[in-house]
Amino acid sequence: MLKKLFKKRIHEILEKYNDKNALIIDEISNFFGQESLGVLKVRGNGVLILTEEELFFEMWKPKKELLIPIKTIIEITNSKSHMHRSVFRPLLKVIFKNENNEVDSAAWYVRNLDHWNEILNKLINKNI
């Protein structure tokens, strides 16, 4: 249902990555926020794309982007909550160094979590 409502928006976001080799995509991921921005910042659905160089997220509405270079990722975990929010299922939590070189984190509820974990861990280990 959600995917149908935001079909045009999803298509716009995916077009940005047409020329890049996406390893995995979740078109209806649920973003739980970025720790450094605080609890009151926007949470919502969007498209999460992983390439060999970056993890990119763009929210459907409002338009909000988060780009995390793979080389800045410290680790990934699977907690059931992030910033006091939960869907009572494991989340993909990415701990990384932000543009200020500070430790930060962001989390998403994604389909195929095990597959995301596997691919991200390979990329992280490759960049160590």
Image (spheres, helix red, strand yellow):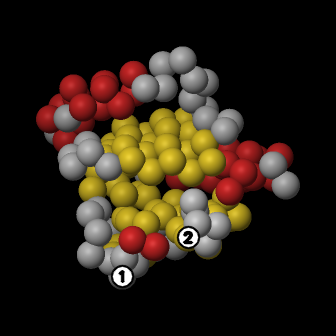
Q: Amino acid at mark 2?
A: Asp
Question: Percent position (x, y) of residue 68?
Answer: 56, 51
Look at 58% across and 66% down and name the residue there.
100
- Location of residue 112 with respect to 105 vertically, above or below: above
Q: Is residue 111 visible?
A: no
Look at 61% across and 72% down and name the residue there.
102
Question: Percent position (x, y) of residue 25?
Answer: 48, 36
Q: Residue furthest bottom?
A: 84
| Badge nearest the viewer, 2 or 1 | 2
Q: Quadrant of the C terminus?
A: bottom right
Look at 51% across and 48% down and name the residue there.
67
Secondary structure, mark 2, is strand
Q: Nearer the viewer, residue 19 or 6?
A: 19
Left or right of residue 3, residue 57 in this image: right
Label for residue 4? none
Q: Quadrant of the N terminus?
A: top left
- Location of residue 65 with respect to 96 vertically, above or below: above
Q: Is residue 105 visible?
A: yes
Crowd rating for badge 1 (residues with CA inside 10 Å; few <14, some 14–19, many 20+): few
Question: Percent position (x, y) of residue 116?
Answer: 58, 48
Question: Percent position (x, y) of residue 96?
Answer: 62, 63
Q: Amino acid at mark 1?
A: His
Q: Please tell me in which quadrant of the rendered image residue 13 appears.
A: top left
Q: Residue furthest top?
A: 19
Label for residue 84? 1
Cα separation between marks 2 and 1? 16 Å
The residue identified by callout 2 is 104
Secondary structure, mark 1, is loop
- Location of residue 26 with respect to 73 vertically, above or below: above
